[in-house]
Amino acid sequence: MTATFMVVEVIGGFLSGSLALVADAGHMLTDSASIALALLAIWLAKRPASAERTYGYNRAEILAAAVNALSLWLIAAWIVWEAIHRFVSPQEIEGGTVLIVGGIGLLVNVVAAYMLHGASGHSLNVEGALQHVLADLMGSVAVIISAVIIILFGWNIVDPILSVLIALLIVFSSWHLVTSVLQVLVEGTPEDLDLYKLCHDMEEVPGVTVIHDVHAWTVTSGYVSLTAHVLADPDHAGDYDDLLRELRRIANEDHGIAHTTIQLETSVRGCDSEDHHVDHLLERQMARKKRRLAFFGHHH
């Protein structure tokens, strides 16, 4: 749908002399590419894991989202560059053609956004495709406004002005996508995971002394992995297998972690070379200190 209308916009843009239409057509080209890329990534992600790729092709989704995010910003830069030339050398624009093509483009983008919206909350990959379509939808609105002003007042300068606004809207609307993709690629802690609370919950399990050397990262949208070392009480009266099962249950059911690897230890020997990551202990100590100060301050 978007690929077909892109051809219409290219023809309309050159016939009318509108940069806004040509910019919107270029963006529709990347819309089509982003949707195709999203579909390819979904197909790749379904391929089974192997000894060479133990996570399979799950990261294909994130790479597709990264390509989509990069292409959005490149398009925005190109639009600004072309708009600068239009400011220096304004061109005559046929407002009627721009208005008709822009109106049809708006309808196409509304339908495309509706089709993608349902799955965008569960996948960065689909969100990337949706951000392309939403940016293009905003571009269609700008094109229509530009056409109306040109028809009513003959102000051709409004075309490059609104083109720059389109570029800024593209960057603004894709900012969350870009930061989310970077967070996954640098294997940062998922933003919706409270790692401190996870550690606290695990340390409340009878037999657990402390959680350390904790790593949590997103493999792909909705698939979070966790590794941790658990120092267990050597005098624990219960079964260690039951303790491990409870720790995995907390990670999976209470915190939404799909894949958990826990190393159980009964001493600190051999831990010298580890990154212990025990900031949650300091955070808990500070929280207790604040509660004590609040308690005494209230009673005082």
Image: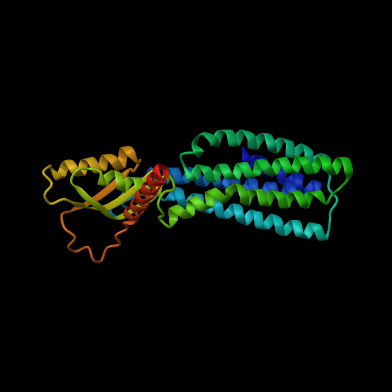
Residue 42 vs 186, above or below: the answer is above
The answer to whether residue 56 is visible is no
Using the image, determine if residue 218 lies above or below residue 140: below
Please say which color scheme the image uses: rainbow
Please count the marks in the image: 0
Quadrant assignment, res 48: top left
Residue shown at the point (59%, 45%) measured from the top left: 132
Q: Is residue 250 left or right of residue 11?
A: left
Nearer to us in this view, 141 or 24: 141
Residue 141 at what x, y percent from top left?
Answer: 72, 40
Residue farthest to the bottom, as pictured: 273
Q: Quadrant of residue 111?
A: top right
Residue 284 seen by the camera: yes
Residue 15's spot in the image, x, y percent?
80, 46
Residue at position x 58%, y 54% in the image? 71
Could you say which is closer to the camera, residue 233 or residue 227? Answer: 233
Residue 146, x across and y down, in percent: 79, 44
- Who's the residue at 51% across and 52% down the image? 179
**Outermost residue toward the right in this view:** 153
Name the quarter where the C terminus is drawn: top left
Q: Quadrant of the N terminus?
A: top right
Q: Residue 126 location, x and y as percent?
A: 51, 42
Q: Is residue 190 left or right of residue 214?
A: right
Asked if residue 134 is positioned above or below residue 92 in the image, the reply reads above
> 106 left or right of 300?
right
The residue nearer to you, when weighing 42 against 80, is: 80
